[in-house]
Amino acid sequence: MNLDPGTIAIIQLAWSRRLGLADDALAGAGDSKRIYSVQDDSRSVSFLRLFGREVFCGPEWAVRRAHGKSAAELSRHSALASLSVEYGGRTVGSEHLCFADVFPEPVEPEDELAVSEDPAVAVQLERLCPPDDVAEAGLAGKESLFIVVDDTAETPVPLAGAGYSIRDGILADISTLTAPANRRHGLGRYATSIAVEESMAAGLIPQFRTPLDNVGAARTAAGAGFLAVGIRSEVQLTA
């Protein structure tokens, strides 16, 4: 399964804008030519590889140091941190960029469950999850929410949830969070599939960002029909 060429062009447009480049920068770049974007006022250093095109962004000193580095090296946030250590480079992370442009196959949980769009229910779900997972997903802050709940009890119990926020007017940036007690039951995939369907119905292209070391997130994305087509790493400059 591949993304439609029209979808690819729109994704390239969205990311060109996000990186402060010309609209056609990624679409027009050659596969073997890396774009270096000097941003002296930037408080971060980042590397993007998307559909075979590469972009390195950061102050001039960082751009100089990045020359000669391979994509494999720059894709590791630890390499970017080493490159910027005297500038207080603090790891943000490295992530796969995943996209979808077809509706996912129908997914139905074993039990009949309700779906809530209430932000307060998303906060309840976050309280059931480890802090690192909560920070990674940022679920309660999403503009549109789809929280799977067990409403058979007097007080509904959140089990898993997904949500999206609109990026650059084009992409639906989706994240998913599942309570530890309810993982490996397909509930995260179910919630994610709802978010994908709703975002596509709104005319957006679903985007899912999965940390390189998060196997569960990668599995959820693949199960909801996402394709990993890029990688991004970033460090913040604190000095």
Image (cartoon, rainbow, N blue to C red):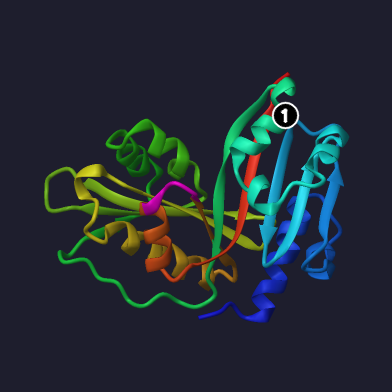
Residue 151 appears in the picture as rendered: yes
Report the residue at 15% width, 64% height from top.
Answer: 111
Please tell me whether residue 214 belongs to the stretch shown in magenta. yes
Residue 135 occupies quadrant: top left
**Quick check: 175 left or right of 54?**
left
In the foreground, 74 or 50 = 74
Report the residue at 65% width, 40% height from top.
Answer: 234
Please tell me whether residue 221 belongs to the stretch shown in magenta. no
In the foreground, 104 or 117 = 104
Mark 1 lies on residue: 84
Q: Position of residue 221 (x, y in %)?
A: 43, 62
Residue 188 occupies quadrant: bottom left
Q: Position of residue 181 (x, y in %)?
A: 19, 44
**Quick check: 159 left or right of 177?**
left
In the image, the segment drawn in magenta is 211-215
Report the residue at 69% width, 24% height from top.
Answer: 85
Residue 146 appears in the picture as rendered: no
